[in-house]
Amino acid sequence: MEAATKRVEQLKKQFAVTDIVDTYSVALPENVETDHEFRVRRSIHSPHRLVEGLAPPFAHVRTLYDLLESSLTRFADLPYLGQRVEDAKGNLGKYSWLTFSQVGEARTAIGSGLIHLGVQPGSHVGIYSVNCVEWSITDHACHAYSMVPVPLYDTLGPDSVQYICSHANVETVFCSHKVLDNLLSSARDAKNVKLVVVFGLAQGQALPANAGSFGCEVIKFQDLLKLGQANPKSHVPPRPSQLCKICYTSGTTGVPKGVMITHSNILANIAGAEVVPVKQGDVHISYLPLAHIYEHTLFNFLTHHGVSIGFFSGDVLSLLDDITELKPTVFVSVPRLWNRIYDKINAGIKESGMLTRAMFNAAYSSKKEALEKGDKSGGRWGKFWDWVVFSKLRAKLGGNVQFMVSGASPISPDVMSFLRVCFANVVEGYGLSEVGIVTVSGFDDPSVGHVGPPLACVEIKLEDIPDMSYLHSDQPYPRGEICIRGPTVFQGYFNDEAKTKEVLDEDGWFHTGDVGCWIPGGKLKIIDRKKNLFKLAQGEYVAPEKIEQICERSPFVFQIFVYGDSLRSDLVAVVSPDPDYILQWAKERGLPQDMAALCQDNGVMLSVLRSIQEQGRSAKLHGFEQVKAIYLTPDAFTIEDGLLTPTMKLKRPQLKAKFESAIAALYAGLDNK
């Protein structure tokens, strides 16, 4: 914080305007020569120019190929990629590691094998799998031979796979054996797919007997590896301006869009992320989908710093077991998991004895107060409380976590504070597929409830939304749609110029659809969503995502879909209850241990509704923002049912269609009151 303060004073003298320089960002005019409104904000670390690449001695690293080559030189014999190995009985054991040099050799062999089979530089190569060693080797192989990876979420069904493979003209697909049937079903209609490479098969396990009957060649990953080793080919390094990836957005509505990202886009983002304090020897667990730009950018950032990356075993339900075995020092996740950890620990504390509760509450209050004052040690008693109370909780995350990063959606300030006290420092980031990682809260910043300042590779402005009364001139906090510009901004949507023009204007600003405000310190706070708004009969605009995030704080709620009919004045919701909580709650009241029966019980429904409304009152929601009636469903919203995107966002049109009759009944019930 002291260094930041000195930097602020230097900039104030330099700009001679004291009210545009904050602790973490600087306000500048969009056009220095003609504009007198200081609406654009940049990082305090680079106010004069946006960072476009790595600083010396790594200025020569301009592509992801260069990045791995640099890491191979510096970290050759260090462990790079690891995954757990099954024993003869199918039990997962310890992590087995490949060094940086072994990964480098494998990517050359895989790339050489592809070239030998006739796959050309510039070809689009699909990767259809959960995160694993083979996923990363394939990605690196594409970069070494100027091919373009097209990641496919492992949760996608045949129709989505067929659409993406056809739309992106994917001719080669690497896939896990677990999704091979889906892929081969898609290959019938995606006539452009000529080669399928399968990994994850057990030693000696043969390909399915019908694998060759789908109009494409199917081979094993290990066979391709051996083919490439026997027929080595020289690398074909890409240029910085070439595509390094086409990431298809998961899409809450409509068909997926292919986000075109260049090597220079990613390298600029990695350079801007240098505020994240990782180092050689750190360990990261990779479980968020590499098909998403969030994990993919982080993955390459960590590769540049010599971090060891262990993959989860493929089942999120076993994630904590993987973490206990791996003992990561860096843990990156999303609010859904943080909320589950928060709820589980609090439930355990409530069920513990009086002495344990008193000890935890004393430790928590003492350390929280110290951290909020900027004392990273946790105060006079910080080490004692860590040893006596919090070490047991930290052991659940392996015991070595030094810091955690939250992203993808907003995290509750209460949950963030809780994690900081019980585990380690937590920062929150914000980004999108089209622009990469945009902001990260300061590692020296004890405050919560914001996503931090811009990274040095982007600039941000807030554009007025008059219909919603969000203006950049609002005081004390300027508000508006978040717009991003800089070297990380994507090249457009693949084969979709019309959609590109909807979000990317002539001046290079990407319009996110998110609404933010600048708070003291020059930090960005996400407050609303321009899209997904609906207007109720009385003319009030409602942002359902904000309300859903508040309702999810109820211990009863696992998932919730809030809906408002434009001809009605009230909100209703469909709720999937948290099975662990509601079954325990029912047991204590002598109610049946049957989710379906509980969801049909009016008394249970009323208790859940009251809990949701209590969260709304605590968050000071307006009356029209309160949910007035709910429908309980025993079934979770899932990707497989088409109700969630692969990044776990609600598909609102599909949810509305599925629960149309239930929603109509809720409104009929409100009419009869």
Image (cartoon, helix red, strand yellow):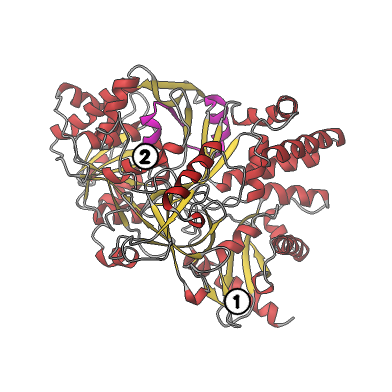
Is 465 on the left or on the right of 233, as rendered? Answer: right
Residue found 32% across the figure and 19% down from its top: 76
Report the number of numbered marks: 2
Residue found 31% across the figure and 65% down from its top: 505
Residue picked out by circle 1: 664
Q: Is residue 386 above or below residue 289?
A: above
> Which stretch did the figure color magenta?
300-327
Is 135 on the left or on the right of 333, as rendered? Answer: left
Quick one: SS at disc 1?
helix
Evaluate whether residue 189 shows in this view: no
Q: Is residue 137 above or below residue 601?
A: above
Q: Where's residue 236, x and y in %? A: 15, 34
Name the foreground residue: 106 vs 43.
43
Q: Residue furthest toward the top?
A: 77
Residue 271, numbered label: none
Residue picked out by circle 2: 270
